Amino acid sequence: QVQLVESGGGLVQAGGSLRLSCAASGRTVNDYTMGWFRQAPGKEREFVAGITWNGFTPDYSHAVKGRFTISRASAENTLYLQMNSLKPEDTAVYSCAARRGRVLATYPSMYENWGQGTQVTVSS
């Protein structure tokens, strides 16, 4: 089981940037794949980006590809999401998640561990 704590959310104007962090701790952290999800008011939680903890090939949703970058610091067990060129439609609660296995997954139901989420608000 992995414990996850997100940070870095906040209020930013359209076109601005934010960097989210997800600190992970627990057993077998390196055997987990990690992902970022978001949920906006009135919408279902959706996949944003994912990466295997020991892998090197990230995956992104179409909505954020080219603007967001997922990365990791293995020695610190920390996952990052660099968000650039933010748009109002990016406004959501962003959560990091972890699942056992080395294959990337994009469905929330496939993840076992979740952080508490951090609010990202992008103003026009």
Image: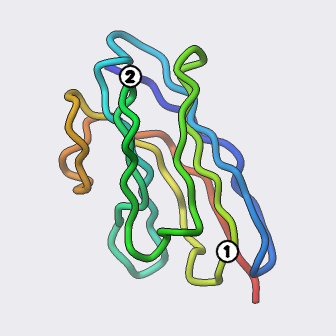
Q: Residue at x 39, y 74 (%)?
A: 62
- Where residue 91 appears, x then y in whole percent? 60, 74
Residue extending farthest to the bottom is 124
Q: Residue at x 63, y 40 (%)?
A: 21
For the N terminus, the image quarter is top left
> In this rendering, is residue 14 above or below 35?
below
Q: Earlier in the sequence, mark 1 or mark 2?
A: 2
Q: Which residue is mark 1?
A: 86
Three-letter residue code for mark 1? Leu
For the C terminus, the image quarter is bottom right
Quarter residue 79 falls in: top right
Nearer the observer: mark 1 or 2; the answer is 1
Image side of residue 79 versus residue 10, left or right = left
Image side of residue 15 versus residue 29, left or right = right
Residue sitting nearer the eye, 57 or 77:
57
Image side of residue 103 versus residue 31, left or right = left
Give the CA separation, mark 1 to mark 2. 29 Å
Q: Residue at x 37, y 43 (%)?
A: 57
> In this rendering, is residue 115 above or below 86?
above
Q: Which residue is mark 2?
A: 2
Residue sitting nearer the eye, 113 or 71:
71
Three-letter residue code for mark 2? Val
